[in-house]
Amino acid sequence: MEKIVITGGEPLSGNITIGGSKNAVLPIMAACILTDEAVHLTNVPNLQDIQTMIKVLESLGVKADISNLSQNKLTVCYEDINKNIAEYDLVRKMRASVLILGPLLARKKEASVSLPGGCAIGARPIDMHIDALKKLGAEFVLDSGYVNCKAPKGLKGNKIDLKKISVGASENIIMAASLASGESEINNIAIEPEVIDLIKCLKSMGSEIDFIGDRKILIQGKENLRGTTHEVIPDRIEAGTYMIAGALIGNNLKIQNIEPDHMQNILNVFEELKIDFKLNKDSISISKSDIEVGVNLQTEEYPGFPTDLQAQIMVLLSKSKKNSSIIENIFENRFMHVPELNRMGTQISIEGNKSIISPSSELIGAPVMATDLRASVSLVLAGLISKGETIINRIYHIDRGYEEIEKKISQCGGNIKRIK
Ligand code: EPZ
């Protein structure tokens, strides 16, 4: 099994270019089921999760042209082959496979998805996806671990109140309502930039979606949508991760191809911590900064501080001279990185969904185990500032969401390599 080996202490300088957003492109790929015409995507990150989504879509009849994926271009085109099942083997690899449910149901009047089990960060049920689709007229049966859904008379627009904010449930229902007959009013939707990017892409496919409140949209269902060309937004979580690397060990490290509007939540924290950064139109330069203060953070839905940067910011907060705390509000089990970080010398304790981060002296490299995508990358960040060697096992998690991580870091001076 491959491992990442880091010898810490080397300052990072030069440029890191951020790729397209993994969590934006996954639902947008699923949206290709809504049309017979080709959807051409640019700024697509070449990641393991994208390959998995291609496999899911291919199993349903989508033709994917991956010949230019190394140039971050992907074309997907749905051809109906009467296969409406997302199989367990694919869904268990990537929960985002459930995003085919809404579009497939809308298009084919039936769809089956293996029920994703729990995962390393929490139980992650899909009850809200199902409840919302029921409101559009779908019927659901759970059989042998699969959720089988049917809408024999087709989906019909309705008023839907999402009981809490969910990125995936919002995306599924927006896609389904785009092909339902009549109008849907959806309240309490997630407004993460990835959801907004999906809406932008759907609109360019002919969908009629209007915001009538901060978290309320009206959708006029259409009989058909058309193909489109869409440029995926930059990955704000990859950007935030490298920004934190810059604050930890940067020497004028420039992170480019970012969308500053999407980075406000982390920039607010950087300002509180008095991190040395200079923000430009689509890039930011950051240098290592001594941190004299602590902060009390909570993860929240966008525009709040993202749960997907919680593990990474924890490493930065451990370098402060004062205590900090983080309350994790989104996932119930997202502190799996804490014991691994503590093995390297951080002083972090957990009480329920709150972690207290106390000042730590120099971190010491160690063999550590990656548990999920963001937990893994927090270990990379810790390795970059540790004395000696850090060996990260189970790095397939990192490859799901960080394109060429060792190349991006090593070309800025970091001592990081992948070994077999
Ligand atoms: C998306 O997951 C992201 N994944 C996650 O990124 C991200 O952490 C999460 O949103 C929150 O921002 C993708 O976009 C592919 P949710 P999603 O539905 O859609 C509960 C990463 O590292 N919930 O917004 O699955 C749920 O358990 C990943 O890139 C229900 O109770 O997240 C959670 O507590 C990890 N019932 C909360 O809502 C439901 O039916 C928010 O989850 C759906 C969700």
Image (cartoon, rainbow, N blue to C red):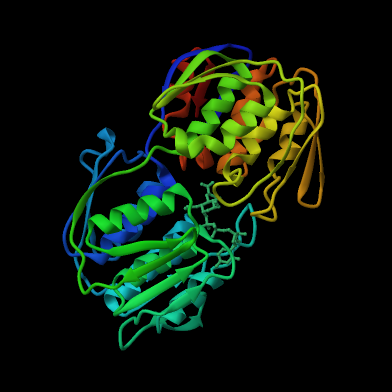
Depth check, front residue: 56 or 361? 361
Residue 127: x and y, percent?
A: 55, 72
Residue name at image x 36 percent, y 79 percent: 157
Res 386 quadrant in image: top right
Q: Quadrant of ligand 1?
A: bottom right
Most extreme residue toward the bottom is 153
Q: Answer left or right for 182 relative to 399.
A: left
Q: Where is residue 344? Give x, y as percent.
A: 74, 27
Q: Is residue 339 left or right of residue 105?
A: right
Left or right placement of residue 305 versus residue 338 in this view: left
Residue lying at the far front in this picture: please name it.
212
Name which quarter of the figure residue 356 lies in: top right
**For this view, does 48 lie left or right of residue 341?**
left
| Residue drawn at (45%, 57%) of the image | 96
Does residue 89 show up?
Answer: no
Against 22, residue 416 (above or below) is above
Tally of numbered discs: 0
Foreground: 313 or 203? 203
The residue at 18%/61% (across/down) is: 226
